[in-house]
Amino acid sequence: MASLAATNHYVEREADRLVRVEVTGDGTVRGNLKVVSGYGAQTRLVDISLVEPRETEETVQVGEDLSTPSPRPEPQSRGLPDAVGTLPVMVLATLALLTALGAVALFQTTAVLLGAAVVVVGVSVALYSLLAA
């Protein structure tokens, strides 16, 4: 005997859905699966057969070259990062700081001041992380 743990599984168009079927007993189980579409406009019964899977012994061949570890990459220098990657970040950081300071000067409210402080702290942490790497 076979049963579904839940009924009325919704499946999107052109999609797949895994449905768990619980089988009691041994051997092949045959039955019908009712498929409904269009909110009940179309109904079909589909014949199904559930067969016990065969136990197989599958082995995996491992190549000899996988038994030796690969060489570790050389550590990068702890100096300044290359200017090609750093320059755009520095320009964006400067723009963020200037925008925050301009907003404080223009609006002069506590909320804008707090927002600018968050931007300054965020940019500072980002620049520190960039230069410390």
Image (tube, rainbow, N blue to C red):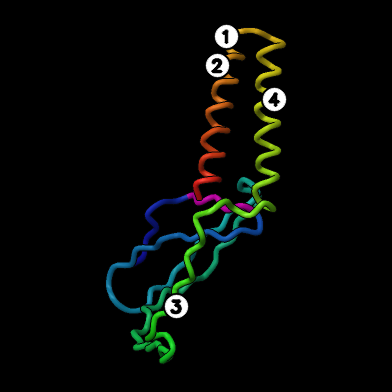
* Disc 3 to disc 4: CB gap under 8 Å: no
**Magenta stretch bounds:** 8-12
85 relative to 132 in the view: left or right? right
Q: Residue furthest front?
A: 79
Identify residue for label 1.
Answer: 110
Identify residue for label 3.
Answer: 71
Q: Secondary structure at mark 4?
A: helix
Label 2, residues with CA under 10 Å away: few <14, some 14-19, many ≥20: few
Q: Determine the residue positioned at 61% across, 14% down.
A: 112
Which amino acid type is marked by label 3? Pro
State the residue in front, 57 or 2. 57
State the residue in front, 111 or 63. 111
Which amino acid type is marked by label 2? Leu
Of circles 3 and 1, which is in front?
3
Q: Main secondary structure of the magenta part?
A: loop
Q: From mark 3 to mark 2, how far is it between C-alphas?
A: 49 Å
Identify residue for label 2.
Answer: 114
Q: Is residue 103 magenta?
A: no
Label 1, residues with CA under 10 Å away: few <14, some 14-19, many ≥20: few
* Disc 3 to disc 2: CB gap under 8 Å: no
In the rendered structure, which disc, 1 or 4, sits on the residue that comes first in sequence? 4
Q: From mark 2 to mark 4, how far is it between C-alphas?
A: 15 Å
Q: Determine the residue positioned at 36% across, 87% down.
A: 56
Quarter the N terminus occupies: bottom left
Give above or below for 33 relative to 91.
below
Q: Determine the residue positioned at 29% across, 67% down.
A: 24
Q: Determine the residue positioned at 38% across, 87% down.
A: 58
